[in-house]
Image (cartoon, helix red, strand yellow):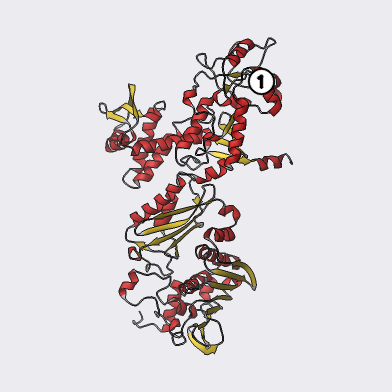
Amino acid sequence: MNSIKILPSNIINKIAAGEVIERPASILRELLDNSIDAGSTHIEIVVDEAGVKKLSIKDNGIGIDEKEIKLAVLRHATSKIETEDDLFSINTLGFRGEALPSIASISKFTISSKREEQDLGSKISIEGGDIVEESPIMMNRGTHIIVEDLFYNVPVRRKFLKKEHTEFSYLYDLFNRYAIFYHNIYFDFYKNGKKILSLPQQTQIERIREVFGLEIADSLFEITDNSVDFNITGFIGKPELSYKTNNNIYIFLNGRYIKDKTILVAISRAYSTLMEHGKYPFVTLFCKVNPTFMDVNVHPQKAEVRFNDTNRVFSFVYHTITDTLSKTPWVKKEIVGDITKNIDSINSYNQRFLDFSNKNELSNIFEQNREIPSLEGALKKSDKSEHFPPQNKSEIDEKNSSQQFTQKHYNYYFPEQLNKNNNFNDSKTSNLKNRDGESPFLRDIIKESLFIKDPNFSNQNISNNSYNPTALFSNLIVIGQIFSTYIVCQSSDSLILIDQHAAHERIGYEELLKNYHGKKKQSEELLIPILIELNYDKIAIFEEYNSVFEEMGFVITVFGDKTLKVERVPSIFINSKITKLILEIIEELQTTGFTSRYEERLREIFSRIACHSVVRGGDLMNNYEIYSLLNKMDEIDFSAHCPHGRPVYFKIHISEIEKKFHR
C-alpha cells in the first residue's frame, strides 16, 4: 500500500470536475446560472458538435472586475456567500465557486468580462487548469465564456459521452427548461454556426408556446397558490397530454431547476386517478420557498434539495394541483366551447321538440330537419312490468295528443318489426336487429314517430330544457346510446361520446370519498343481514382494520368464529354485490396493509370498489338514467376521467366529420 499524501491541484480539479461536469449540458447549466445571477437580460448560446468542440455563452450582465477575474477561476472563490449562515439562506443559483475552475481544468477555456464603468475588459485563457494568456480586450459590458475541446486531457471521460445528437438533446432540453422559466430574458441559440432559435422577452405562456408549440400551450391551465412560506405558479396539462416518462415535468425552486422526489411524487399523486398507470403529465411548476426551509448544498450539480418538512411541501403542491384538476377546466373548454353557439343550438333543438300535439307535427319536423334519434341507442330491454309498448297505432296517437312532451323526457322504443296492421310484435321489444346490414322498417318508424313515454320518468326528477351556463355535461343534446356502452351527445360544434361505465365509476368513486371524509356517513340498513364465512386469517385482517370499514359506511360485526355479519352498507352500493366487495377490500388490506401510504391505498381500494359496483358497458340506459348521469357528472370533481385514468368522454369536432365527407 502506498503512503498517504496530498494530491496535486491538477488532480484535485479533475476530481472536482468529475463531480460537477458530467457532459456538455452540465457546463451549460453552470454558465447559465452565472449569467442569470449577474442580472443578464440577453444571453447568446453557441454550440458546435453538441458542445464538445465548442460551447460559448455571452451575456450582458454586470460583468467581473478586472482585479477579480483571476480569482473567478480559482476553486472556492465566490461572491455569493461570506459566512456559514449564508449556506442556509441561499438566494442565488451559484454559490460554491467550483464551476469555472472545474470546467477550465478539463478544457481549453477562455473568459472575457467587463463592468460598465471600465474602459476595457479583461481576458484570460486557460488550458488544463493553467493560465496561458492574459490580456485586455475591447468589449461591451458583460461576460463571454468559451469552452473548447471538452475532456481533451481526460480521454477516458470523453469516451463515455454519447452520440452527438443525444448529447445535443440533453443540451437543448436543459436550455428549454431555463427558457420557459426565465421568459424575461432574451435568448439566442446557435447550433453549428446557424441560429435555430431566438426568444424575445415575453409572457410565460407565450414562451411556452414558442418553445413547445401551440398544441401543448393550448392544453395547459394556470395554477397559483400562496401561503406564508410557500408560493406556487405555473401551468398544468390536461390528462390527455401524457407521456411515458416524467421528463415533461419542469420544476423550478427559487429560480433553480431541480428534480425533487417529494414534488414529483406530489404531482404524480395529484394526477393518479386521471391518468393510466405509468403515464406522466406535462407540468411547469415554479415554486418559491423560504430559503431557510431547505438545503441546496446536497448535490454536486445542485439538481436536488433537501426540505426540513417534506410533508408540508408535498401537501402544498398536491393540493394546489388537485384544486385545479378537480374543476376539470379542459372539459369546459372542449365541451362548452362557444357559449353563445351552445345556447342557440340547444334552444333551437328544444324548440323543435316542445309542445307537440300530434304525430303529424312531429313527422313534419323530422321531414324538414332530417334529425332522428339514434335507433340502437334508443332501445332499452323491457320486462312485463315496465316500459311495455302500446299495442296499436291508435293508442300511440292517443298518448301523443293527450300529453305535451319534450325529447329529453322521452325514451325511444322501436319494435323489431311491424306487421301489416302496424301492430307491435309484443314478444320482441328488447333489441333492434339489423338484418343484412339494413333497416327495412326505418322509413316507417320515422313516419309513425313512435315515441313511447318512459313511465318512470318524472318532470320533477330532471331539470327543464333551459341552458345552464355553469353546467357542462347536462347542457349537451343527447342523441342516444350505441353498443349499449356509449352515450352519444352533441355540443355546439362537436359530437361527444361518453363511456357510461367510466362516468359511473368516477361518480361512485367520488361519492365513496365524500362519504368517507364526511362526518355523517350515508349508509343503508339491510333488510336481511349478509353472512360471509371466512377463514381465520381473513377474520384477523378484518378485526385489525374494522375501523376502515366503519369509515367507509359499513356496519359489520364478527358473528361466531369465522363469519362476518354485514348490517349496513354505503348507500351508493346498496344494489351491488356486497360479499364480493368486502372480500376484495379484505384481500387488498391483507396484501398491502394500511399503515403506509394510507391515503393512496384508500383511494386504490375505493377505485376498485367503484369499478365493480356501477353501470357497466352493455347495460342499456333509458333517458332518465342518461340525463341523471349527465347531471351527476356536473356535480362531481374530476368528471373527465375514471379513477383509473381512462377518459370518460371523446370529442369529434365537426371539422373532422366534414373532412371525412370531403366537405
Residue 637's place in the image compared with 362, above or below, is below
Q: Tell me the quarter of the image containing the N terminus.
A: bottom left
Please tell me which residue is depicted at 58% across the width and 32% down the height of the picture.
477
| Residue 84 shown left or right of residue 31 in the figure | left
Q: Can residue 604 be seen at all in this image of the molecule?
A: yes
Q: Residue furthest left?
A: 560
Name which residue type carries label 1. Glu
> Which residue, given by chain and number where applicable, does mark 1 sit on?
361
Out of 363 and 294, give the one closest to the viewer.
Answer: 363
The picture quadrant where one finds residue 260 is: bottom left
Please tell me which residue is depicted at 49% across the width and 20% down the height of the picture.
456
Give percent across and percent down for residue 340.
Answer: 59, 40
Out of 396 and 68, give the one closest to the viewer.
Answer: 396
Give percent across and percent down for residue 60.
Answer: 53, 76
Question: What secondary structure is marked by label 1?
Answer: helix
10 Å crowding of disc 1: few (<14), some (14-19), many (20+): some
Q: Residue furthest right?
A: 662
Give percent across and percent down for residue 441.
Answer: 69, 19
Out of 13 and 72, give the one closest to the viewer.
Answer: 72
Give percent across and percent down for residue 293.
Answer: 33, 63
Residue 54's place in the image compared with 315, above or below, is below
Please tell me which residue is depicted at 69% across the width and 28% down the height of the picture.
369
Residue 179's place in the image compared with 468, above or below, is below
Q: Tell me the quarter of the image containing the C terminus.
A: top right
Q: Can residue 621 be seen at all in this image of the molecule?
A: no
